[in-house]
Amino acid sequence: MPEKGLSEIETFRIEVREWLQKNCPESLRKRWPDPFAEFSVLRKLRTGDSALWLEAMITKGWTAPTWPVEYGGGGLTRHQNAVLQSEMARVNAPEPLLGMGLSMIGPTLLDLGTEAQKQAHLPDIITGDTRWCQGYSEPNAGSDLANIQTKAEDKGDHFIINGSKTWTSGGHLATWMFCLVRTGKYEKKQQGISFLLFEMDQPGITLKRIKLISGDSPFCETFFDDVKALKENLIGKLDDGWAVGKRLLQHERSSIGNSPTQPSGENLKVPQLVTMAKQYHGEVNGRIDNPELRTNIIRHLMNRKAFKLTTKRAFDEAKAGASSGDTTSMFKFYGSENAQIQHELMLEAMGTNALAWEGEDFSDTELETLRSWLSGKATTIYGGSSEIQLNIIAKRVLNLPE
Amino acid sequence: MPLNYSEEQSLLRDSARDFFTTTLPVSNLRELRDEKNETGYSTDAWRQMIDLGWGGITIPEEFGGLEFGYKGLGVIMEQAGRTLAASPLLATCALGVTAIVEGGSSEHKKDLLPLVVGGEISLTLAVDEQSVHAPFNIDCKALKEGSNYVLSGQKIFVLDGHVADELIVVARTSGDTTSREGITLFLVNAQSKGISYHPSVMVDSRNACRINFDKVSVAETQVLGTVNQGAELLDFILDVGRICLSAEMLGSLQEAFDRTVEYLKMREQFDVQIGTFQGLQHRAARMFCEVELAKSVVITALTALDDGADRTSIAEQASLAKAKVSEVFKLVSNETIQMHGGIGMTDEEEVGLFLKRARVAEQTFGGIGFHMNRWGELNNL
């Protein structure tokens, strides 16, 4: 039992600590090389400790700690959530549920959905009963996202969709899609776009996996042939979906960069980088025995530290009500660029062994380093490329002329 | 402690901003330069700062100070940086006061600190002996003779060196030239017999001086800290100086950046504002990100001082701040000149003064390489 005289927040911390001790399965308290693959799985497909952990967290509402209790969220304040996150990090407890439901469409519905839409979708997002994918990019709409051509025709109580999307991450595993479609006429191409939700398990949807340079296939091409979306799943106004789409992108950027709204745990690769550098190059008096590599690593880690402090500062300023404005683009830009530098340094530190594609001569770390270096090249392209983020900073933050 | 300024600190920053823009605009530095001012700062303006209580901003209340903390001094120095204002804030309030508060006897504190608060004396630290900062390469010797020490040697690049009333001199009392052991700090009256001053004219038009000590006699009661064990005290004094200087540099680099963004909106070429060019927009946006990082390392370091963090973590924050802010100031000052084009090369335009200050401030108390290496060692890299 918590002692008397403790502040409310300290009492909360003790309760969280005791609860985690009891409910977080031992087998899950480790470092996951790819937590997303493990913990984005649908509720009904979970087995073993992963299922136990998810169910336990659902009862507390802690898969979505700060969302309102009425939809099944935890209803925690930012401060309480920070305590929960730090206690989870302390025992290496993994996030029980990951995915675009929690990180993108959920927050967007909380911002812009009707009450009926929130009630229809948020509870299933919180429990992992739905798994979401994103219908944004098209073959001719990448960085020029507003150039979408997929059409939705108004059929009274529903829309009929024809066209195609690409870079649909996890499309083959998803049960629902949120999608930008063209519904109306326009002078500027940002007009006449609508934001729709529909189920993936229906006739007319065809998926084709895309093989990437990393050998992995996390993305699909998605083709629509008379696919149906109910009117009640139109988010925002008809022809005014660009505003909704942009709001969602802000949530996406926050989840890619190191967002101030979700202070993330320590990047697991930092200690690995230093360990590898010393292992492959030797050490003298505790120093990496390669002056050039050492300097590059120090510079990177200092920038990384300064970046983390910036997320903390933005978080503290927001809490004190002195928000410094639209900085999500900065976090997305700097966070993703920094992650790539980290991968490059890992390769540099490990030499040719980290360039092996497969085989028993090479360690798991070596093989994983290569693959994550390759797949990491995507982080400065998706969610608005680095160049798009710099455009946004120039125009919206610095107010430079068009 | 959270990484933002309290309401009180924000109010202080606002009034400091008003003070420096009206009383000590950039043109004041130019006037000091052009008239070859011997003091190196406006004594009238310093008197006004004293009247505002800024001389004792970090000094404990029992000695008449405001005890407002390092974030308080930090926000003032940041605003001083915005107008490149020359003043004794760094040498007296950051270095000198810290040396006395941390290393002085109760007599030193009682005698000197109220005089600092009242603006009656100024202080400085004499440490460097060579062009590249190496604070433990000390050849300046202090030999014990009876109850006195006799000091001989040379110091260079002493900030406010020829105007300070009391010098904190780093000298060797034992050990060889590069050893951390055997260093002692002395509080030396500037008028002592055997001291000669040779002011250096630096590119940033700020104060610096070469000082020669020729058998200067100093009473043993003038030792700050412990004989032969001065290295830790020196580290801390320098770290406070580095952090406060980083705050000043942060103000200067923000001002240079703001002026550059305004220029991009104003200057027209090819019949359009040059700020419409993506080649310039992206460089400006990258600089924006770097400026945000610089703000974070400065407030973190000031917070560590106010929280009374342990010396190792203060050292780590000081080196992170000094290295990062120096790098960002270098980037911003270079881009400022480039983006202003030909006008930026003229003496009449003020942005050149920011470039000049950037390099002197970078080298003061350790450059980028010095602090990267130190941070690396502190982090076992």
Image: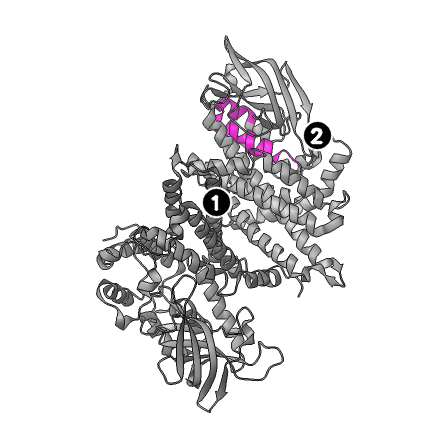
Subunit of label 2 = B
Identify the residue position indicated by label 2 in the image: B201
Identify the residue position indicated by label 1 in the image: A302
Residue B41: x and y in percent read 69, 34
**Viewer-proximal residue, A326 or B225?**
A326
Q: Quadrant of residue A210?
A: bottom left
Residue A327: x and y in percent read 53, 59
Q: Which residue is drawn at 52% across and 84% down?
A: A183
Tell me the CA gap for discs 1 and 2.
34 Å
In the image, taking residue B83 as reference, residue A182 lies left or right, namely left
Quadrant the C terminus of chain B occupies: top left
**Mark 1 residue element:** helix
**Viewer-proximal residue, B122 or A328?**
A328
Q: Relative to B39, is B189 above or below?
A: above
User: What colour scheme governs how the chains and residues are painted in the rendered image of this protein?
Assistant: one colour
Instruction: Kindly identify the amino acid type of the residue bearing the numbered disc 1.
Output: Met
Q: Relative to A89, is A254 above or below?
A: below
| Residue sitting at the far bottom | A156
Residue A194: x and y in percent read 51, 80
**Viewer-proximal residue, B208 or B49?**
B208
**Viewer-proximal residue, A307 or A85?**
A307
Q: Can residue B78 be seen in this view?
A: no
Crowd rating for badge 2 (residues with CA inside 10 Å; few <14, some 14–19, many 20+): few
Q: What stretch is highlighted in magenta?
A: B86-112
Q: Relative to A402, is B138 above or below?
A: above
Q: Is residue B7 visible?
A: yes
Instruction: Kindly identify the amino acid type of the residue bearing the numbered disc 2.
Output: Val
In the image, taking residue B248 as reference, residue A18 lies left or right, namely left
**Mark 2 residue element:** loop
Main secondary structure of the magenta stretch: helix
Magenta stretch: includes residue A272: no
Q: Which residue is drawn at 68% across and 27% down?
A: B200
